[in-house]
Amino acid sequence: MGKPSRSSHDSTSADTRRQLLDAAAGVFAGRGFHHATVRDICRIAGANLAAIRYHFGDKEALYAAVLHETAPAPATPPAGSPLPPLATQLRNFIHSFLARIAEEGVAGHHGCIMAREMVDPTPALDDLVQHFIRPQHEWLQRLVRDLAGPGFSSAQIRRIAHSIVSQVLFYKHCNAALSRLAPADCLSPSNLDDIADHITRFSLAAIASFKNSDDSPRPARISSRTRSRPSR
């Protein structure tokens, strides 16, 4: 009986690698990095411990590979593509972001892992920020600057971008509370458009209010030393 061909071996190796990634994504999403074990990942993947060492090196490298390979396509227009009007660009960004975090099952593993990273970061977050989060955030800041026009500082532009992102993430991180407080507002395919429209309108109105406030007097800040004290 002849030996297996090289192409057959390569195919089997690629299959094992993919099975490890799929199994690891589910375990990391469900338990987080620190509570996940390579033994459980290998058991689910139908592989042995040596397979992780062969394909990835160790648990940390496997985790980094899961974050990298399960990351969805950026929610920004590809370079060189014709761009829609600015407000539509913002709405498209928000809608795409909401759609990603609304994913469930296998498709939602990356979002679950990312949610865990935000509250319990690992060393893998540095690379993820550099190659996935930062490019999108810089794109969003450029869009906000175009929407806002002149007269805004870099800090103001950056914080407006933070606020837009925070509105989207609210529907991910507060879903459990929303299901009890206002079930109709839980993120789902049926209300994805409505929520995207609301966040877009709210954000555009906020930017406009900043513009309109430039010419109006601003209340003086009251320091802790001059703040009135209750009479005794």
Image (tube, rainbow, N blue to C red):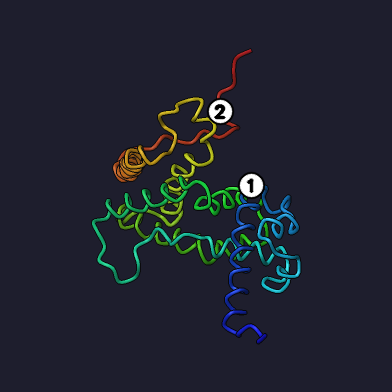
Quadrant position of residue 204: top left
Q: Is residue 68 left or right of residue 216?
A: right
Q: Is residue 128 left or right of residue 33?
A: left
Q: Tell me the SS state at disc 2.
A: loop
Q: Is residue 212 left or right of residue 223?
A: left
Foreground: 94 or 208? 94
Foreground: 100 or 54? 54
Q: Residue furthest bottom?
A: 2
Q: Is the residue 109 above or below the residue 181 in the image? A: below
Q: Nearer the viewer, mark 1 or mark 2?
A: 1
Q: Residue at x 30, y 44 (%)?
A: 208
| Quarter the C terminus occupies | top right
Q: Whole-percent x and y of residue 4?
A: 63, 83
Can residue 213 be seen here? The reply is no
Foreground: 42 or 158? 42
Q: Residue at x 61, y 50 (%)?
A: 29
Q: Whole-percent x and y of residue 134?
A: 50, 62
The residue pinned by badge 2 equals 227
Q: Whole-percent x and y of residue 161?
A: 43, 51
Q: Which mark is residue 61?
A: none
**Disc 2 residue crowd, few under 14, some 14–19, many 20+, Cα 10 Å:** few
Amino acid under label 1? Gly
Q: Tell me the SS state at disc 1.
A: helix
Looking at marks 1 and 2 on the same chain, the residue that comes earlier in the sequence is marked by 1
| Quarter the N terminus occupies | bottom right
**Disc 1 residue crowd, few under 14, some 14–19, many 20+, Cα 10 Å:** some
Q: Is residue 95 left or right of residue 111?
A: left
Q: Whole-percent x and y of residue 155?
A: 46, 54
> What is the C-alpha distance between the residues marked 1 and 2?
49 Å
Q: Residue at x 51, y 33 (%)?
A: 222
The residue pinned by badge 1 equals 30
Q: Residue furthest top?
A: 232
